[in-house]
Amino acid sequence: MSPQDLLRPAAVALPADATRDPRRWKALCLLAIAEFMVVLDASIVNIALPDIGKGLHFATSSLAWIITAYLVAFAGLLPLGGRFADLLRRRRMFIAGISVFSLASLAAGLAPTAAALVAARAVQGMGAALLAPAALSLVTSIFPEGSERTKAFGIWGAVAAGGGAAGVLLGGLLTGGLGWRSIFLINVPIGIAVLLVVRALVSKNNGENAGRLSVRRFDIAGAVAVTGGLVLLVIALSQATAWGWASPATLATLASAAVLLVLFVGIELRGRYPLVPMLLLRVRTVAAGNGIMILTGAAMLGLFYFLSLYEQVILGYSAITAGLSQLPLALSLIAAAAGVAPLMKRFGARIPLAAGMAILSGGLAWFGMAPVNGTFAGDILGPSLLVGIGLGMVFVPLTAVAVAGVPAASAGVASGLVNTTQEIGSVLGLAALATLANSRTNAIAHLGPMADALNSGYAWAFRGAALIAAVALIVVVITVRKGDGAGPDAADATALAPALSKAGNERR
């Protein structure tokens, strides 16, 4: 198999009457609900963190693991989940994913200890890594190319965005009304309902691959290496404050993480069936877009994590009030994302992307000035609107840049790579910012009230996120060109083709 085959999504065999299948829109609703659950679960937990900490006696400095465990498993195994969806029966993988996700949600909702909750969250991430790519592959197989697929993808994107925005509100309502366990248990009846109707709405023959498969076609070694490397790196960043940055434990963990990540790159470069086709990163726009996405993910997740803690721990907001207070951010994000398309059509991706990154950095820095006795009108509303506008202006052009210059057969793989790098950035960013906040809090805890020390730590985290966004802005200015994202970059696509062909000839 040549690298062209590796980059090309699995062929989709559509039935002749696919466009007339009366079940297709109901099937889309079902698959979108599953995707909504995955996206929702990454954001709904933030509001519940203080209540979880009290209920399971979590140390404040360790709360980040509730989110990190989910994201590490999701990010590390997402490429492998996509490979499973391409090479095995998509409906089967979807059913497996929703089953694992629902059972893990039940375990999380009933978790008796902090360790049990973190373990359940990791299994949730594994289920999401199976579920998400299978669901999207099914959408692609059910709707043929053309206006119906475009409409279906539009609905899919709106549901995904809605999941992130709804997380802050539903997290507050469920936690405040039914307790923190309900944010996990709510997934169980939804998952059961999806399992009961999926066979009636989604045919097992939608673009399925039924041939004999070899385990060698699944890059298990690559998945283990990247997931293990991420876990060790997060452990090192999270524990460095307690262990000491120069301690043998920290240095050994960092070294082990580096070895595994370097090993992962080697596996991907030499493997016949890589999870991440490294040839794609030779396209300038792909490399630039994914590098910027790592930084954006790092800044974004830290924002929501520390904003929830600031509102509830420092300002004393209830879970419901905290959820409602973040609605302006979510709504401004949706509005900005919807309005950035005309700017891209006129200026390309570079100008709106740079402007959005600058606005995002400014909003994060504003959050970094929030005092202990802050108010919603004076210290939360303004920076929330800036951050929402900035994020909305960033994600659409950034995705366009990350897939620009990629041959049409590789567009699906390039899009999946963007999702993976965003999750990896979120994992590493949250670990680094949590360490920064904990270090600051510990350093000044003896100087006055604990609330002052915690608030100072949160402020440092916001400023750290602002600095990450500022670095991303510099990368945008340096690497993104004026016409990127306005249409296919023929030069880069042409440059990639000979490299693929040459490598393919060498491997035959």
Image (tube, rainbow, N blue to C red):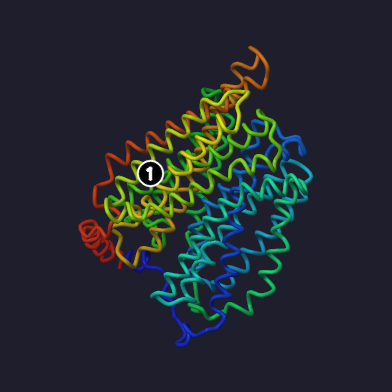
Query: Relative to 55, does residue 121 appear above or below in the rendering?
Result: below
Q: Considering the image in quadrants, where does the C terminus appear? A: bottom left
Give the residue displayed 40% in from the left and 48% down from the top: 265
**Residue, far bottom:** 16
Determine whether the residue tagged by mark 1 lies in a helix, strand or loop: helix
Is residue 169 shown left or right of residue 182?
left
Give the residue displayed 72% in from the left and 35% down from the top: 58
Residue 290 visible: yes
Numbered marks: total: 1
Is residue 441 shown left or right of residue 14?
right
Residue behind mark 1: 292
Give the residue displayed 55% in from the left and 26% down from the top: 370
For label 1, count other residues whose C-alpha is less than 10 Å away and answer few (under 14), some (14-19) or many (20+): many
Residue 59 spot, x, y in % from top left: 70, 31
Residue 462 spot, x, y in % from top left: 51, 31
Is residue 81 shown left or right of residue 146?
right
Q: Considering the image in quadrants, where does the N terminus appear? A: bottom left
Query: Relative to 186, does residue 87 appear above or below in the rendering?
Result: below
Residue 209 visible: no
Image-quadrant location for residue 357: top left
Query: Relative to 32, does residue 244 appear above or below in the rendering?
Result: above
Q: Which three-letter amino acid code belongs to the residue tagged 1?
A: Ile
**Residue, far top:** 447
